[in-house]
Amino acid sequence: MHSPVPEYLADVLAACTDESPAAIALTTVDDAHHGAGDLAHRFAIQSMSKPFAYAVALERRGWEAVHEKVDVEPSGEAFNEISLDPRTGRPHNPMINAGAIAISGLIGSFEEFARFASRLAGRELQMDTATFESERSDAHRNLALAHLLAAYEIIDDPVEAVDHYLRQCALLVDVRDLATMAAVLANGGVHPDSGERLMAERTAIQVLSVMTTCGMYDDAGDWLASVGIPAKSGVSGGIIGVLPGQVGMAVFSPGLNDHGTSVVGIEMMRRISQDMGMHLMNPGRPSRSALADVRVGTDETVYVLSGDLMFASAESLFGHLLDAPPQTATVAIDVSQVGQMSDVGRRMLLEAKARLEEDGLTVRVVERDGADRTPPDGAR
Amino acid sequence: MHSPVPEYLADVLAACTDESPAAIALTTVDDAHHGAGDLAHRFAIQSMSKPFAYAVALERRGWEAVHEKVDVEPSGEAFNEISLDPRTGRPHNPMINAGAIAISGLIGSFEEFARFASRLAGRELQMDTATFESERSDAHRNLALAHLLAAYEIIDDPVEAVDHYLRQCALLVDVRDLATMAAVLANGGVHPDSGERLMAERTAIQVLSVMTTCGMYDDAGDWLASVGIPAKSGVSGGIIGVLPGQVGMAVFSPGLNDHGTSVVGIEMMRRISQDMGMHLMNPGRPSRSALADVRVGTDETVYVLSGDLMFASAESLFGHLLDAPPQTATVAIDVSQVGQMSDVGRRMLLEAKARLEEDGLTVRVVERDGADRTPPDGAR
Amino acid sequence: MHSPVPEYLADVLAACTDESPAAIALTTVDDAHHGAGDLAHRFAIQSMSKPFAYAVALERRGWEAVHEKVDVEPSGEAFNEISLDPRTGRPHNPMINAGAIAISGLIGSFEEFARFASRLAGRELQMDTATFESERSDAHRNLALAHLLAAYEIIDDPVEAVDHYLRQCALLVDVRDLATMAAVLANGGVHPDSGERLMAERTAIQVLSVMTTCGMYDDAGDWLASVGIPAKSGVSGGIIGVLPGQVGMAVFSPGLNDHGTSVVGIEMMRRISQDMGMHLMNPGRPSRSALADVRVGTDETVYVLSGDLMFASAESLFGHLLDAPPQTATVAIDVSQVGQMSDVGRRMLLEAKARLEEDGLTVRVVERDGADRTPPDGAR
Amino acid sequence: MHSPVPEYLADVLAACTDESPAAIALTTVDDAHHGAGDLAHRFAIQSMSKPFAYAVALERRGWEAVHEKVDVEPSGEAFNEISLDPRTGRPHNPMINAGAIAISGLIGSFEEFARFASRLAGRELQMDTATFESERSDAHRNLALAHLLAAYEIIDDPVEAVDHYLRQCALLVDVRDLATMAAVLANGGVHPDSGERLMAERTAIQVLSVMTTCGMYDDAGDWLASVGIPAKSGVSGGIIGVLPGQVGMAVFSPGLNDHGTSVVGIEMMRRISQDMGMHLMNPGRPSRSALADVRVGTDETVYVLSGDLMFASAESLFGHLLDAPPQTATVAIDVSQVGQMSDVGRRMLLEAKARLEEDGLTVRVVERDGADRTPPDGAR
């Protein structure tokens, strides 16, 4: 038996584009990894580095020091707008270039960022020298911002801050790296694989909040309403998304719209949000794990699901079934305590049933109606 | 035995102000109602009407018709800013006055709004004539906006639209009305009391999204980051807040800051968010109900909690204990399946234990460590 | 014999358009009137009323009262921009609609404006009721501005102020009316025909200054550089222009550009400026040297001054006296041919007389009155 | 005997300040030089270099090339505002820093500017190395502007353009240098001392026009209305002023207001304007009537014209000829005392001659060259 998620992701990819390279990856807070498309394709992280650089600055320089230099308000402006608070010179937020350069100035060392990003991704990330050098040779707009920040004493050395910022943007990643990095934010700052805490939970919450209001520049309101996944895009064609407590994700496709965001990437995010009910405002957002109990009897194993059955929760059932296949000939999946069941949740439940049956097992689903409510013998 | 929530709310109120009138109310999606302070004090709904008027327009005039007239982007501006899209005249969003007047123009009838608001509140709301007449006599800024909207053909009759808008703002509510109205949004559009669907789930999600990015005007970014509860304030001194899938809340205290938002109200919302972990980006957002099972044995009743134990879930345990007090002399509260337990969750758990003991029962808590893991006899 | 000016104007008209109606008129400060085209065609004065309404307000309400309500800075904006000083609500200047409505509010009576405009034009001007009623029925943008001004307490009654403003704009004029009205400004506030002073010279200077920086809205800089004639256009197709001390002019042709200014009108003004050297910055405007002749007789030297006696011209007399001191015991300074004599000019003249007398000479000043008009013997 | 002007200037200086250094200088278009105060005190030219750099660019790079890069509209903004046309990146005008840096980029060579400025001043101007190096070390705002201009391809090398601009600003001048440089603009581009043409008259007119609308930044409207002298200030404490056809002037006093303009300097300019009637809109600037005398003899009538022969003055000759046709068979038009004669003036003169001849009269024109200088018999 295997998980249906990769197939679903491949369907999304196929429905949105037939061009290459293109890829999707998901990492749940329970460290399940799924993906489809050109998963090995690497590209520059670009502006998708901004949430993580903001996290580094908060953790290493302190909240007060950071917010003295950078505000957290949506600007309603394009990413490269030359616009600072007219009195203080503070950039509107750390997701626009001005704010990101101020953050680079605060961190003070490209290496420190690179080390942090590598720990988030779980592998040593490398800078793409060609990207860096090409962008440094045409960095007038960023240098303009940096000199302006220096004029307001937000940063000291504008040329160095831009150098650091451009190196940060030139780190090479693939969608799986990004999905894992995003999953650390989804998981409150704890790496889903190693269980290591890489930032305070309050930092992860702060970063996600600012991604929500400022991550999609002048499209923040429509993005939150229609997609509902805090996100950040980069001009290399990637978009990362985070659903707190559930999943980190990343999509990639190079064609950009006027805002510098991947056209196909937007479409993929939108579909995943709709198909999976993955919207921040979804009233039925599930508990971390829907697998409330596993009762192993003599001839039947009962899997008790609780909370709402949506993507992440159904995924946890699959994870368990794969890790510890049932040793009994009969299996019961008890959904009688389940609150809400999303389409994708039900689809995955039936998929689980079908795959267990393919493996030769007898499977019954205990629904809420009570007919099958009586706990199976083996559970007693 | 009774719920500790009212006491907690009274503590919050006392910590934030000793002035009167002041009040807090909470309504959960499971229709639990709690409050503290001057719960009977009525005041004009003012701008807190905007999310509900937006919902009426979406439901009655259709999404396309609404978004042709009003955008959903944060403006980074004060509530009464004279600022429309320079080409189309569309207000930036329905939470600023310009957008709300456009919405009034779309709805076309004050009575239609009043009926809808009354159904949300669960009682017949009345307009305060004195408030309405006072505001109509000094409505120059709103009339300016309305005439400008008419110049762009966003509305037809500016004087009528402002009349309708000011009547809408003059509806009298108390914090319990507002908490219940907010709880309908938290509950995906279904009234938590009657179970009646008052708007499509998609509408509730849209309204909450727009409240998140635009509800606190030029303070949206900081509010989401530091409080994390989609909210809307009114110049009468009230603020409503919604945590999707969990709770609607309202606070009231008349003193306003420069943005026209209640100073004490902000402080109360901030405390509740922090104490209860009620932040939209909280990675441990709980399942709808943590009470996974109740196993009634001969001499012991076992309450099995699952998911994350936070405010709303702990509250559901209290609700059950109050509705159906245990009939056995011994009670076990099984938290061995609980994922995360917030401070307020643990506090409420211990409170439940103490109160049951006050009632003369023997109570044990089954923790995850396994010592008490063995299911009680009576459950078998 | 007759003046060649009408033929020249007819040539300009023919070169710029063959459409009808179209017209040009010029009135000099010496009350010469010339014109070409459809001189009898009447049209609404529209925004060309603004400089004259500003003059009425300055004269009747006082400078301080006016500038408390309206600033005099170019806004760089279109005529109908909704833009006031964010703190005080003051419109940027009296040439944009917001400022003109504030001026209407200050004047307080349409009749007062109509009487003043009629005196400027030299005939009783009538309002076009059809124009007024049509514009009142679609005055949303002006009503928006007026309500906004009322919100800032710049005006009291917005509906009345707009009514007054629209009546003012609907006054019917022809190009000769406008050229004469403009000539009063060119002539320092004195009607070129009657010689009656209709406003203080300081008022005329103020109005012309504000026309120069603000009259052509967001095109002020290019207009002054390329045409160099302070001007004001109206959406009826007219443009008035003033060259201080020389001429008032008006052109008319209905086709408008995006700024609401007559396309052919601009072209006609541009040609007249170029052909006639009528540019405010033209260095050849004043008489270069007022010392027209020096007649050295046996016992008297006569210094004949001509043109206007102002700083530069009086200065040239001093220069000559210093370079070549008179060799006769008696000196006559003949100012009988001098046009205007400024205060500084007169002061310098008397200073010259005193200093020559200090040097032991006898000095007489030959004034215009004729007593001393007979040229001194020595000059023959 | 000597000129009263220096005493007057000393009075102005004493009335405005008793601090030192402070100075005033005036240079007339007839090359009279006057001054008071610390005339030898040298200071950096700073932004007062901008009009002259603009002139260099127009003369050397051509009007089209310049206006492709820099607009001529007032920005209503402070001198150092980071604000360009959002689409093209063009600075609003050459008087704000952004525009001046673009002009520096166009000129391409500091030496070219320094040579031109030295010719205007009539002596070899030197750069103050200390000023230059101090400003280069803190040039973040100008570097920000320059990089932004480079991003829009307005300039190529931002670091070089700022270096050039700062060198230009560091040229050392005294008020007499500045008054003479300003007098070249007043004199239509011709040096009042050498008589050498240093720029086309059209260039001088353009520079003066742009100084008028843009020279005093966000105070342009009030400055033109209340002072009426096209001007440009510098942060070193100097202000230059130009009254076309009359005088160039410069004032100096170090104390600055919030706009970076000399407080005492403003006051001195204001006084000179009021005392001397030196206002661009002063209706008494040109000679009112060029017909200085009519000498009726037995067989010849002599019309003596004086002042400058331009439209309004030539027009007055026509008026007289029409009102009172000559009664003699021969007519002389004496233009020997005429200062300047514009094209339209000459055309009208010849037109008058032709028309009188059509009427059967004999007409001679007495030119300045002297051949016909002898007054005709009939005039005696």
Image (cartoon, coloured by chain):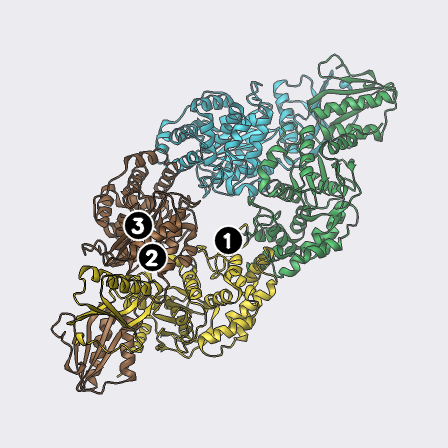
Chain colours: A green, B cyan, C brown, D yellow
Q: Residues within 10 Å of mark 3 (few under 14, many from 20)?
A: many
**Rendered image quadrant of residue D197:** bottom left
**Rendered image quadrant of residue B364:** top right
- Residue farthest toward the top in the current orientation of the protein: A371
Mark 3 vs mark 2: in front? 3
Q: Do the dots labelled 3 and 1 sit on one chain?
A: no
Mark 3 vs mark 1: in front? 3
**Is residue D145 left or right of C305 when viewed as pictured?**
right
Q: Residues within 10 Å of mark 2 (few under 14, many from 20)?
A: many
The residues bearing labels 3 and 1 have C-alpha atoms spaced at a distance of 53 Å
- Place of residue C209 in the rendered image (x, y in percent of width and height, measured from the top left): 33, 57
Mark 2 vs mark 1: in front? 2
Q: Chain of mark 1?
A: A
Q: Secondary structure at mark 1?
A: loop
The relative height of residue C175 versus residue D247 in the rendered view (above or below) is above
Q: Secondary structure at mark 3?
A: strand
Q: Which residue is mark 3?
A: C36
The residue located at (34%, 77%) in the rendering is D32
Between D55 and B127, the residue placed more toward the observer is D55
First in sequence: mark 3 vs mark 2:
3
Q: For the residue marked with disc 3, what is the amino acid?
A: Ala
The residues bearing labels 2 and 1 have C-alpha atoms spaced at a distance of 31 Å
**Is residue A331 left or right of C325 when viewed as pictured?**
right
Between A32 and A240, the residue placed more toward the observer is A240
**Rendered image quadrant of residue C6:** bottom left
- Place of residue D41 in the rendered image (x, y in percent of width and height, measured from the top left): 43, 78
Q: Is there a contact, CB below 8 Å, between mark 2 and mark 1?
A: no
Between B316 and C298, the residue placed more toward the observer is C298
Q: Which residue is mark 1?
A: A86
Q: For the residue marked with disc 2, what is the amino acid?
A: Ser
Q: Is residue C308 visible?
A: no
